[in-house]
Amino acid sequence: MVEKRIDTYRLGDMQAVYVLDGETKNPELVLLPADMEYREQKREKPYADSLVQIKIAGDIYPGGYAGGRTLRQGKTVEDFRYEKQEVRETKTGKEICTFLRDHRNYRIEHRLIWRTGEKNVRTFCIFYNEGEKDAALELFSSFSLGKISPFLEGDEHDSIIMHRLRSVWSMEGRLESRTLEELQLEPSWEGHAVRAERFGQAGSMPVNGYFPCLVLEDKRNHVFWGAQIAHNASWQMEVYRRGDAVQMSGGLADRESGHWMKTVKPGGRFQTPEAILSVCRSDNTETIFQRMTQALEKEADEGAECEQELPIVFNEYCTTWGCPSHENIKEIVETIRGKGFSYFVIDCGWYKQEGVPWDISMGDYEVSKELFPEGLEKTVSFIKENGMKPGIWFEIENVGSASKAYGMEEHLLHRDGSVLTTTMRRFWDMRQPFVQEYLAERVIGTLKKYGFEYMKIDYNDTIGIGCDGAESLGEGLRQNMEGALAFLRRVRKEVPDIILENCASGGHRLEPLTMSECSMASFSDAHECEEIPIIAANLHRAILPRQSQIWAVIRKEDSLKRIAYSIANTFLGRMCVSGDVCGLTKEQWRVVDTGIAFYQKISPIIKKGFTMRYGMEVTSYRNPKGWQGIVRSGQGGAYALIHGFHESAGCEVSVPLPADYEIADVYSFEEEQVRIKDGKLLLTITEDMKAVAVYLREK
């Protein structure tokens, strides 16, 4: 293979290198650290890999035993030849547009966008049908990066590691790191057969199985490539190998993995979701993940003014368990007023009718006369009078089996001609104008009528592979989720400065697109579990800590040690408190109050900082053993958070610090012997299931 350099572009501390295959005229994108030089590969069996991966129905499928494993790099891709490249200087940075065309007058535009000062880029692709026949897409990627790694010769076995974040309900974000050899992605003796690892999720919970995130590491040269997909429905990532070099790509889940096909008629166009990409040279995996999460810093900075100091939330769910009323809310508010809480959220159940559980009655959203006999006005006014912004819970897109909405079948999603029904739930067809207006009346109307300033948006089941009403089930799902996003944006437009909380059974929608529309997210549903600090620390790799709402559920039977453990968990993100606050003793409140004061000191570092994670490997989340240490450093200071789990008593903790610090404050339920020596924070864990937090100030 003879290749030609199209151009190289400096993008902050990164560079984008575009090369052209001399035979196929396929352009390839190579993303590198700016201080490392790209050189042409001298490999035994090199293959060009296009920066756009696409498959059109009717075209020849890729060979090499690819069927059922991947649709990448087939005849459709080979036929798309490089046409031209344009560079556009914008007010915020730079756009590089690469154009491809095939013999049928199908055209593709690949856009790479860099915002000045950022450590990541965004990409997406647009397909234009300028031909005479329909084009049925089976695969259309948001990104594809080639030549990983250009700093290795041959296959350089055991040199490339794939990192991904696994996720299941209440155990989100477990890091999985495996060599390509362990994944059977090393090339064959002849270089013939395709090697492919395709993973993702199908449905309306994009973090149900994996986060839409992939990292490849060249461990010999300490270079990392990372990608996130910003999409609220089915997605996929692929690591691909045919020969020595490795490629990574991703975007919408394709026909094989996401039941997706899209017909683009002559004169039509289709645009992929956006991908966030980054590359860096580093000695740790944390850097690449946090470079990607920083892509949403600008959106967070431009959010509601009241959010900029990371105010504290009280949510009554783990206090009333889905049965909020004016009387119990009044008692809670009287107990917590003046203690530093800015938001008070009325969670699920405010609409439930007598004798009907909250989780099967959502959809009608008529205020319960039993729970709020004088209406919600009185309750909302009481919350405001006591200095807090009132919030309310909705499960917008689903309807419960006991609701009247459940029977409105013509306005609900269908599959195979039948109403799409899961246990207890059905789903609105968010594409319908009727549904949009119904929800505008019930949801936006409620927010406006009562003056709510915060909305928790829950979502407690998944549509799965898709729904009727489009050329494929997967396309039906994509269109429906586009409608859901449109409604969310309508809420923001009609209720300016509304604080939106993204919740989907806790953490099932923690992807960049939804997060860009919300102020924060429920990190998980592990509200009272020992594993909270493990999950919360995991999420520093996936979302901004300033957007990660972590719960401290306080029970009146809790020991002071347990209360401090629960409160300290929230130092890993946004503090949210719930539980038996009306029954706490003075000593219990002392531990809560000092924890709130500590959180307020470190909140600027939570907002803007860098996280490193230390400690023992934790295999079982439900039965954690050993200890975990987090150090988050920011401008002017840092904090360390140590959690001792089971079998940790007596462990000597030594955590390296990134600068010369002195101890400014320590949070625990008792006095702690903490010291700094030779640039390390040292302490001895005295008891199992104990947390210690240390606020550090630069000398």
Image (cartoon, rainbow, N blue to C red):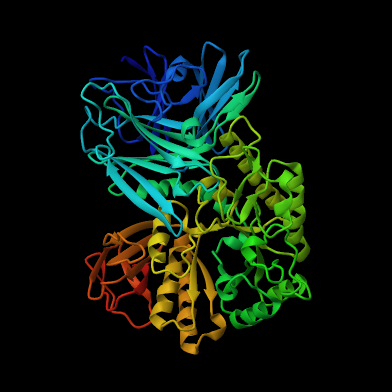
In the displayed structure, does residue 483 sit left or right of residue 626? right
Could you tell me residue 191's position as x and y percent?
26, 22
Identity of the residue drawn at 33% across and 59% down: 613
Could you tell me residue 442's position as x and y percent?
75, 57
Residue placed most toward the observer, 121 or 145 = 145
Q: Quadrant of residue 263?
A: top right
Residue placed most toward the observer, 420 or 87 = 420
In the displayed structure, does residue 15 sit left or right of residue 380? left
Q: Quadrant of the N terminus?
A: top left
Q: Quadrant of the C terminus?
A: bottom left
Question: Where 492 sits versus 7, above or below?
Answer: below
The count of marks equals 0
Identity of the residue drawn at 55% across and 55% down: 504
Residue 71 visible, this orientation: yes
Q: Quadrant of residue 503?
A: bottom right
Could you tell me residue 300's position as x and y percent?
55, 53
Question: Where 314 sits versus 15, above or below?
Answer: below
Q: Quadrant of residue 450?
A: bottom right
Work out which residue is located at the far bottom of the displayed protein and give it.
586
Identity of the residue drawn at 62% across and 79% down: 332
Could you tell me residue 583's position as x and y percent?
54, 85
Residue 115 visible, this orientation: no
Question: Where 153 sits versus 435, above or below?
Answer: above
